[in-house]
Amino acid sequence: MKIITAMAVASAATLFSPRGAAAEAAGPQVVRFMLQNGMDCLVIPDHRAPVVTHMVWYRVGSADEEPGKSGLAHFLEHLMFKGTEKNPSGHFSKILASLGGQENAFTGNDYTAYFQRVTRDHLEQVMSFEADRMTGLVLNDKVVNSERDVVLEERRMRTDNSPAAQLGEAMQATLFVNHPYGRPVIGWEQEIKKLNREEALAFYRRYYAPNNALLVVAGDVTPDEVKTLAEKIYGPIPRNDAIHPRTRPSEPEAMADRRVVLADTRVAQPSLTRNYLAPSYRTAETGEAEAIDVLAHVLGTGSLSRLYRKLVIEKKIAASAGAWYGGVAYDTTRIGISATPLPGVALEDLDRAVDGVISEIVENGITQEELARAKTKLVADVVYSWDDPFTLARMYGAALTTGLTIETIQKWPDRIRAVTADEVQKAAKKWLASRHFVTGYLVKPPAPPEKRS
Amino acid sequence: MKIITAMAVASAATLFSPRGAAAEAAGPQVVRFMLQNGMDCLVIPDHRAPVVTHMVWYRVGSADEEPGKSGLAHFLEHLMFKGTEKNPSGHFSKILASLGGQENAFTGNDYTAYFQRVTRDHLEQVMSFEADRMTGLVLNDKVVNSERDVVLEERRMRTDNSPAAQLGEAMQATLFVNHPYGRPVIGWEQEIKKLNREEALAFYRRYYAPNNALLVVAGDVTPDEVKTLAEKIYGPIPRNDAIHPRTRPSEPEAMADRRVVLADTRVAQPSLTRNYLAPSYRTAETGEAEAIDVLAHVLGTGSLSRLYRKLVIEKKIAASAGAWYGGVAYDTTRIGISATPLPGVALEDLDRAVDGVISEIVENGITQEELARAKTKLVADVVYSWDDPFTLARMYGAALTTGLTIETIQKWPDRIRAVTADEVQKAAKKWLASRHFVTGYLVKPPAPPEKRS
């Protein structure tokens, strides 16, 4: 079975951004209710096709791991496919495949989620399966040891084989020196190697419980149907009273500029990346995150963006340039900027040109035209997401497990429309003129240093 | 009362290095024994003056704090002067002052230590006091809150008022991305602010116990006298069976070069610092740490060192240049290099020149003359330490609480003498040609960036 893993901040970044989506009050209607055992439930009806997406999200991710045990949340996600007494390993996947269904899972900094897509008549079956493995996971050392090798290979493929991914890890670790977002979701290799059955089960028992879970069902169902089924199937699972809201260490004030350089012969295209510390939708002041979304759009989305116009079109020093904002995160998150130089252009020069573009916004703000265009595009992009219950389910799941509300999502278009140019400039001043950033250079190794004697 | 705090890696760095000391078999004789309750005891007799140094070291430091509670070990060190039922706050200090005695304490990454220096007839009295506060600490919120302000002020004075200290913190956090040595001993400001009475007491109860302590008595005493007193005074304190050997997260392999730049108008003298990850005496392979000590000496101790000769004398680009090795640490530690440029010299140029000096050793090794000179000096410096029981006590305390043995210390001169030029070159190749380092630039802020349009 294939397991995908979404690296959290990166995946969260797409949720409210142009490639992702958000729902408007006029958009999809959702119904939320809670079971007696504390299980949070959300239904997103969509009757255009007789298909349902069933997801269970746990409010636990890599940022909840203990120091020294990085990768445990993701490792457990893999192990969750290893069977229970009732459904031994492979049993359910076989049934699901025979029904033409799909299943998968992903782990982020703040959540771990499991999902299936089936025709509507099989909803009860997948629910029963998910309920069974919420508490019934059975693991033996052989299975655990072999799955650890799978994860190590996954790490080698994703990170160690990719200079860009290695640089990303180093930048993340350098930007977040105190908060656990500094470590990779997949874990550090030397720590993955030491993960074992006991630790996986302890983590499972601590965090997997109905009162730490969010059920999302999207598609050809009614809220009443889902409620009846959820009460019957998830209702009997006892709550875990040891579950508390998450508190994680915060970042110290940054005093120094940080730069990370990764030189690797495999680098085909050098690039420059900046990551700035920024508040998430949960931690930001009212309207601030929306202003940052507009800022990132004006700065770096599309060929009319500041970065593209200045670096690619006017100065002709970059082949590409962009910006993004990872607003959906439980704690303080990132604004990212990246650019690739044209041949012969030094990263230092590109770096200074990026500073120039940022300074221009910090000092003079954005135009009304840019503001209007960004808002229109951000809101318009949302509409596309309404067409796909799976995207919607994923968006609501990520939002609700990172401390947001349905209202945050539904009023997001209105709040984007309310952003002013002043607020955008204020956000630029506060977050892009701060010292709390890291710059990454991805380069080919220089020629060996000349000897000095 | 004044409390000093030794920042651990920095203070450990001096222990085996020229400014510090180590003892030779022909040097001071020490006697070590263990009480029934697991308290480790070391006596260093020295009868030249009727004075004793009495120290209790706990095998707990800032690297043992939980994430989000940085500064707790050091905060508790302060609070340990706030009194017990038997000895209310200030009581003992007054008595000690009236006897002409001294007392103080210090916290490092790996240990927290308390000491008194008194005439020999008062040893029992200070022992009784220290034994009393090992378990009898009494704290109320008022005292705790006011002491927290003292610590915050200490942080402001030491770190926030010093660009060099700020850079040091940022470099430490950037070098150690996973291991708790990445956080400052004094703690991050935002976390110090949240420390409270309950947390301090929980930390105290968890780590302060005879079987987590090392008693060091140096001076005008015999081992028998100390044993009798220790059994009488410390012996009755019950052991804490919840104390286990420390295991801390290790560092991932470094793939990217990291640079930290601190620009501050208060910088009078720009400087360049490099910190390389390196094994400590406890974690190194046999003979490796000794080879690094020789390497650091050849590279950067004194006016005959490579760095000084090349940068200060030959190239005339630096006002000073040096290197050190912080070998006494429980976990992986650092080799440091620093240099200050002459006016008009760019740090980038100094940086490249430092690379040149390192490459020269990595590629061609050191000369027999350099090797012999380093060994002679390193061993000779040790002799000076024999003269000071306090220095000896501190050296043994740091060594034994970071996992070293008496033999490591006593055979150190012999092991230094056994280091070969090949081993030094091998150490340079392994640790100074690695990617696991961070470079720090301390600079005045540049003129405001020119506007690009």
Image (spheres, coloured by chain):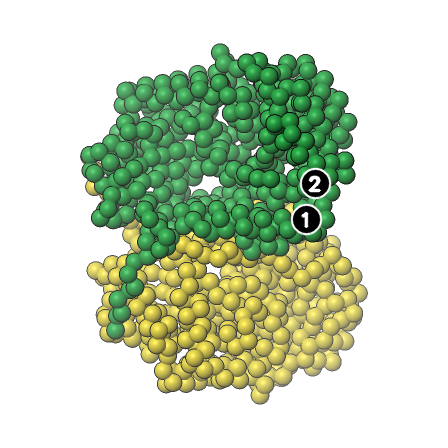
Chain colours: A yellow, B green
- Where is residue A1? Give x, y as percent: 56, 58
From the viewer's perspective, tell me whether residue A382 is left or right of residue B360. Answer: right
Residue type beneath disc 1: Val
Label 1 sits on a secondary structure element that is: helix
From the viewer's perspective, tell me whether residue A117 is left or right of residue A225. Answer: left
Residue shown at the point (75%, 59%) measured from the top left? A240
Query: According to the image, label 1 marks what residue?
Result: B143
Picture quarter containing residue A284?
bottom right
The dot on residue B89 is 2
Residue shown at the point (67%, 23%) measured from the top left? B122
Residue shown at the point (65%, 43%) measured from the top left? B79
**B37 or A85: which is nearer to us?**
B37
- Where is residue A43? Give x, y as percent: 66, 77
**A7 or B314: which is nearer to us?**
B314
Quadrant of the image for the C terminus of chain A?
Answer: top left
The dot on residue B152 is none
**Residue A75 in sight:** no
Residue shown at the point (36%, 42%) measured from the top left? B274
Give above or below for A288 relative to B161: below
Label 2 sits on a secondary structure element that is: loop
Q: Are marks 1 and 2 in contact (CB under 8 Å)?
A: yes
Residue type beneath disc 2: Ser
**A229 or B311: which is nearer to us?**
B311
- Where is residue B77? Give x, y as percent: 62, 40
